[in-house]
Image: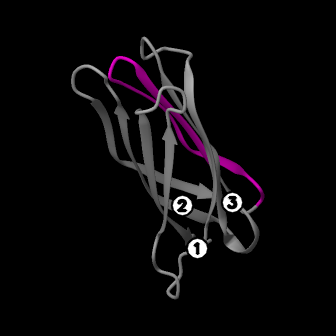
Amino acid sequence: MTRHLVGSLNIHAKDDESVGKDEFLNIPNLEIDKFLNDNGQVVTIVDGIWRWGGECRLEAKFFAQVIGGGIVSVFGEVLLFEGTSENTSDLDGRQSVKFEVPRTTSSNPNPTKRFIEVNNTDEGGDYAHLNFTLRNLITEE
């Protein structure tokens, strides 16, 4: 049966400055609205690159797949770069992510929420927070 994964992703990130003011990235309510077949199909739900502060870049790629019992598995990776420009190849933080979104039903009506944090593990201070809110709905055929 086809599942309908709906919800949002909110991103808040900080470029920590030793001199001057810290700079922030705020992406509210990035919409997620994907249909998933239960045949093992993998669907991209987030594929983005965000730059801010003149020195930081966040790359996030997430996928979804229906697994047994109508449960949706969400998996992916977040990369945090910080250097002398927003195009730097200096990877300072990486976070792999995997979580499940159970079927949204009358007995389980609340959305699944997942918080993800990736930190600058080299110089410290810089970070990105990602907050998923997702519902796994059935689609009538």
Which is nearer the N-term, disc 2 or disc 3?
2
Question: Where is 33 relative to 102, above or below?
Answer: above
Q: Quadrant of the N terminus?
A: bottom right
- In this picture the colour scheme is one colour
| Residue 101, horizontal then vertical, whole percent | 59, 66
Question: What x and y, as percent, mark residue 110?
Answer: 45, 76
Which residue has dot 1 on it?
Answer: 140
Q: Tell me whether circle 2 and circle 1 mark residues in contact (CB < 8 Å).
A: no
Residue 138 location, quadrant: bottom right
Q: Is residue 85 above or below residue 53?
A: above
Secondary element under disc 3, as helix, strand or loop, is loop
Query: Cα distance, mark 2 to mark 1?
Result: 14 Å
Query: Quadrant location of the C terminus?
Result: bottom right
Q: So how many labels did they put on this image?
A: 3
Q: Are there few (<14), some (14-19), or many (20+) residues within 10 Å of tag 1?
A: few
**Which residue shows up at 59% across the image and 45% down it?**
62
Q: Nearer the viewer, residue 134 or 85?
A: 85
Give yes or no for residue 42 being in the magenta stretch. yes
Q: Position of residue 85 (x, y in %)?
A: 42, 12
Amino acid of disc 1: Glu
| Crowd band around label 3 with a 10 angstrom C-alpha radius: few (<14), some (14–19), many (20+) | some
Examine the image and state in which quarter residue 126 appears: top left
Q: According to the image, label 3 marks what residue?
A: 37
Q: Position of residue 22 (x, y in %)?
A: 27, 29
Q: Which residue is mark 2?
A: 5
- Extent of the magenta region: 39-63
Magenta stretch holds residue 57: yes
